[in-house]
Amino acid sequence: MSMKASTREIDGVTIMDLSGRITLGEGSVVLRDVVRDLLSKDKKKILANLADVSYIDSSGIGELVSAFTTVKNQGGELKLLNLTKKVHDLLQITKLYTVFDVKEDEATAIKSFV
């Protein structure tokens, strides 16, 4: 199953709805391209909705970290929303859970952007 991404905007926050697998190859390329596209349009408040992401491999984790760093370096914020148990556990194991700002509720997440 390949990864799909769509974006929508609420109150100046761009929400990336991701579904499928973020893996080496297509999945991580899709994520990178969407983030770059948003930044090129000066969209710097990005919320990655991972509710429908079934799997992330090490390359996908690297791509998430890279996206986070790229957005931060351009003065923006990237937050994660609706982690599945598998993805949540993966971020805990890799100690990245403390790096990302992870939210459980979309409305709260949108309000958390300054």
Image: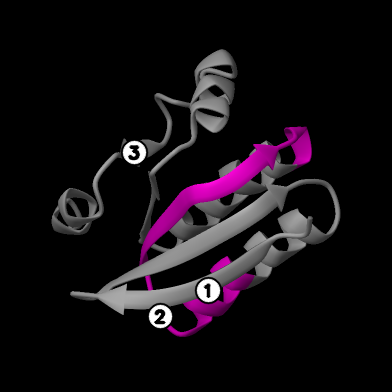
In percent of width and height, residue 17 lies at: 48, 63
| Three-letter amino acid code at the position of disc 2 | Asp
Which quadrant is the N terminus positioned in? bottom right
Q: Earlier in the sequence, mark 2 or mark 1?
A: 1
Q: Which residues are magenta?
A: 34-59
The numbered dot on residue 42 is 2
* Image point (45%, 38%), residue name: 83
Q: Is residue 34 left or right of residue 103?
A: right
- Quadrant for residue 75, please give it: bottom left
Q: CA distance from mark 2 to mark 3?
A: 21 Å
Q: Look at mark 3 in the image and give the residue it sits on.
A: 101
Q: Residues within 10 Å of mark 1 (few under 14, many from 20)?
A: few
**From the viewer's perspective, is the residue at label 3 or at label 1 nearer?**
1
In terms of image quadrants, where is residue 56? top right
The residue type indicated by label 3 comes to Asp
Mark 3 element type: strand
Which residue corresponds to the image point at 53% horizontal and 20% vertical from the top-left?
89
Q: Which mark is residue 6?
A: 1
- Mark 3 / mark 1, whichever is N-terminal: 1
Closer-to-camera residue (113/110): 110
Please, is residue 26 above or below residue 55 in the view?
below
Front label number (2 vs 3): 3
- The residue depicted at 17 percent of the width and 51 percent of the height is 112
